[in-house]
Amino acid sequence: MTELTLIRHGQANSGARSESDYDRLSPLGRQQAMWLGEHLRQTGGFDRVISGTLQRQKETAAALNLDGRQHLTDPRLNELDYFFLSDVLQARHGIPFPTAPAEFAAHVQKVLELWRQGDAGPDHESYEAFGARVLGAVGDAAKAGPGAVIVTSTGVIATLCALALGLEAMMKARLFLKVGNTSVHRFEFQDGELHLNQFGATPHLDYPERHSARTHY
């Protein structure tokens, strides 16, 4: 059995309305990653970092990699294209992109349901294909041996949790909203099946003076 540590990227440009504008860490996001790097160093460290190829994922990996361990990238760890799916939702159903955090819960559920039903179009990665690629990425990381931390995004982590727990799309949407920036999640493969060992830990932000640094957007 190989345990895998997955980490969501630090806070990005939360006011963005496009993938290109969103895809960079905020100053707080970089600090979150550095604090996590210090925590990981104090609790045993890691041998290598694997991240997706998105800028916010690579920047997070670099900021937490305080000892300069090997950094590999795997595009299979990249996030779903939420902004594209949101544009499709608005074009087809007139539902605009949320302007306040409280509106995201309903919006995420509608976006994921549209995607699951195949309404994003034949040229866009399907809901099922996304699940297969992220499962393949962590499966290959497990085969390469222990000691890796994997930096990825909300949709990847929520999808893996849903696969491990056998959850339907509506419950996956709820998980989507609970994956905090630089939160730590642990999985393992046992007899070829994915198991969830830990969800959403933020030990590096548990100090009273850092509570205000906990973010989801």
Image (spheres, helix red, strand yellow):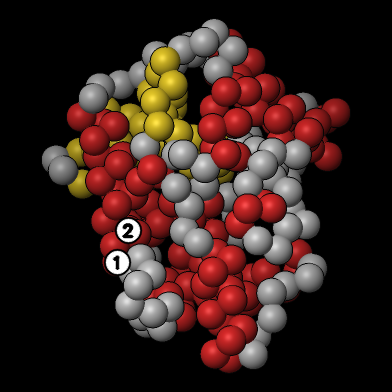
Q: Which residue is mark 1?
A: 128
- What distance separates the C-alpha of mark 1 from that of mark 2? 5 Å
Q: Are marks 1 and 2 in contact (CB under 8 Å)?
A: yes
Give, as a three-letter code, the residue at label 2.
Answer: Gly
Query: Compared to 38, does 168 lie above or below?
Result: below
Q: Callout 1 environment at 10 Å: few (<14), some (14 to 19), or many (20+)?
A: few
Q: Locate residue 115: give its quadrant.
A: bottom left
Q: Residues within 10 Å of mark 2 (few under 14, many from 20)?
A: some
Q: Residue at x 43, y 78 (%)?
A: 120
Q: In this view, which residue lies farthest toward the bottom?
A: 93
Quadrant containing the N terminus is top left
Find residue 131 and name its label: 2
Tell me the number on the disc at residue 204. Answer: none
Note whether residue 22 is visible. Answer: yes
Residue 109 in percent (x, y) is at 54, 75
Question: Could you tell whether 60 is left or right of 189 in the image?
Answer: right
Q: In the displayed structure, does residue 194 sit left or right of residue 95?
A: left
Asked whether the viewer can see residue 184, the reply is no
Task: Indicate the position of residue 191 as horizontal and vertical percent values.
Answer: 14, 40
